Image (cartoon, rainbow, N blue to C red):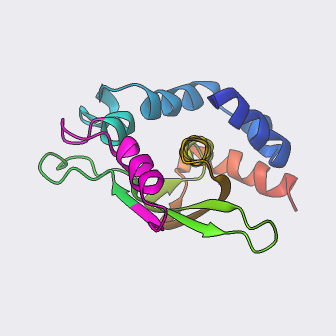
Amino acid sequence: RDNLEVEEAMQKQYPVIDKYKDQKEYDWMVANFTVQEEVKELFNANSYAVRLYNYMNSKNQIDWVIRRLKENPLQRSATLTTFEPLTDELYIPCVSLLDFQKRVDETSNEDVLDFYVYARSLDFGTKAYVNMVMLTQLLWTVAEKTDMKPGKLDLTVKSCHYRLDSVDKVKRILNDNK
């Protein structure tokens, strides 16, 4: 599944995304998850794409998750990190720990893949929703490649915040959704 399909599904469920989306911020975050490069705005730290698909220049963590869950039917989980302790000094990734958990749906008896994510910090005035779109896409991709039904995305955020230049936008969003 591609970004557009995930975005459309999220917009149906959460119309606030489309109403308040900043296309430049959205495109920047999508690139962070899909383009393997150093990110100038983050002190030339590796993008999430590098961290997920070429971790420490040696491991495709998403392929590892898929293999781990697919090759052993008794395996219930696979966990990865985006933190690169040998190089992350000026920038620590906001989305830090990703944990895929397999369970059996009690009603359908189908295998379901839930996705638990720990984020050190997310800016809910700008890019947090794009993180959620991209993490949902990742869940759908891994579920599809492991022959499971996508389950829930459970996001734990240590520091939910917004910047001062986003105050008006955040107030509009909150007032529109009372």
Q: Is residue 68 magenta?
A: yes
Which corner quadrant of the image does residue 26 belong to? top right
Q: Position of residue 81 (x, y in %)?
A: 33, 55
Q: Does residue 17 appear left or right of residue 39 in this picture?
A: right
> Viewer-proximal residue, 93 or 144?
144
Q: Does residue 171 appear left or right of residue 161 in this picture?
A: right
Q: Quarter of the image for the N terminus: give it.
A: top right
Name the residue located 41 percent from the left edge and 61 percent from the top edge. Answer: 78
Q: Position of residue 21 (x, y in %)?
A: 69, 34
Q: Compared to 121, does 84 lie above or below?
A: above
Q: Which residues are magenta?
A: 54-78
> Viewer-proximal residue, 167 or 16?
16
Q: Is residue 56 magenta?
A: yes
Q: Quarter of the image for the C terminus: give it.
A: bottom right
Q: Position of residue 37 (x, y in %)?
A: 30, 25
Name the residue located 62 percent from the left edge and 42 percent from the top edge. Answer: 133
Name the residue located 34 percent from the left edge and 26 percent from the top edge. Answer: 36
> Viewer-proximal residue, 70 or 102?
70
Q: Position of residue 19 (x, y in %)?
A: 80, 36
